[in-house]
Amino acid sequence: MNPGERARKGWLRALYDWVLQWSGTPQASPALFVIAVAESSFFPIPPDVLLITMALARREMALRFAFLCSVGSVIGGMIGYGIGLQFLDWIGRPLLDVYGGWDSYHRIQDLYRTYDVWAVALAGFTPLPYKVFTIAAGAFRIDFLAFVGVSLLSRSARFFLIAWLVQRFGPPLRKWIERYFNWAALAFAVMLIGGFVLVKILF
């Protein structure tokens, strides 16, 4: 690992710890909402980590936390859409440069050409870079209402599933969620898309 990569990982770890420290404060719920907003357009740490910690601490509130996370994430997605639509050169390009997102951006363009707004659903539920998809959706002028609807569906599905798992199974499931949930979500999305493709081929 070169010094630049070590510095980047150290910076991300510090930011990750900073996000987690909000869980033990009276401002935990507003912090979760703000982080969910920010992550959908520019912030690197997903709100999942704070959602899991807060849901474990207050399992009876897990679904409420998921609601806050979902609404915040969709609002953040709308901000990302606006950046791509109106401010791609001024804000969008620097953000994509920071996150090394230009290669992803061009691949996402192909996804939008093939799947239109449903590409957002794929990013909203899986570990794909949702913020890059939201910026790209604006840049490619995807239908805004469809974008919001699909974002709400996919983001809610992700966060409510995480909250339900934590509420139902508690601390023993935390390591599994943190280690394997993204892979499970990606596998589910691949199977779903494969099913659609198969139906299209057969019928």
Image: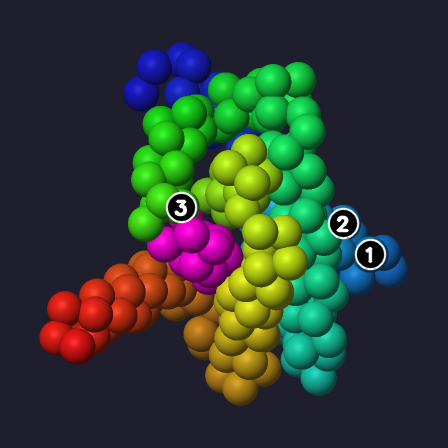
Question: On the picture, is 51 further left or further right than 24?
Answer: left
Q: Position of residue 37 (x, y in %)?
A: 70, 49
Contact check, label 1 and label 2, Cβ < 8 Å: yes
Residue 66 has which mark?
none
Give the image location of residue 74, x and y in percent: 66, 56
Per the image, the residue denoted by label 1 is 30
Amino acid on which disc 1 is placed? Pro
Q: Amino acid at mark 2?
A: Val
- The image quarter in which residue 60 lies: bottom right
The quadrant of the rendering that contains the C terminus is bottom left
Instruction: Measure how far apart labels 1 and 3 are at the Cα level.
Output: 33 Å
Q: Secondary structure at mark 2?
A: helix
Q: Position of residue 107 (x, y in %)?
A: 33, 36
Q: Residues within 10 Å of mark 1 (few under 14, many from 20)?
A: some
Q: Residue furthest right?
A: 26
Q: Which residues are magenta?
A: 115-128
Which residue is outermost to the top? 3
Q: Classify residue 73 by image quadrant.
A: bottom right
**Residue at the disc numbered 2:** 34
Q: Main secondary structure of the magenta part?
A: helix
Mark 3: amino acid: Tyr
Judging depth in this view, the residue of 48 and 201 nearest the camera is 201
Q: Residue at x 21, y 70 (%)?
A: 200
Query: Sequence-wise, which precedes: disc 3 or disc 2?
Result: 2
Q: CA distance from mark 1 to mark 2?
A: 6 Å
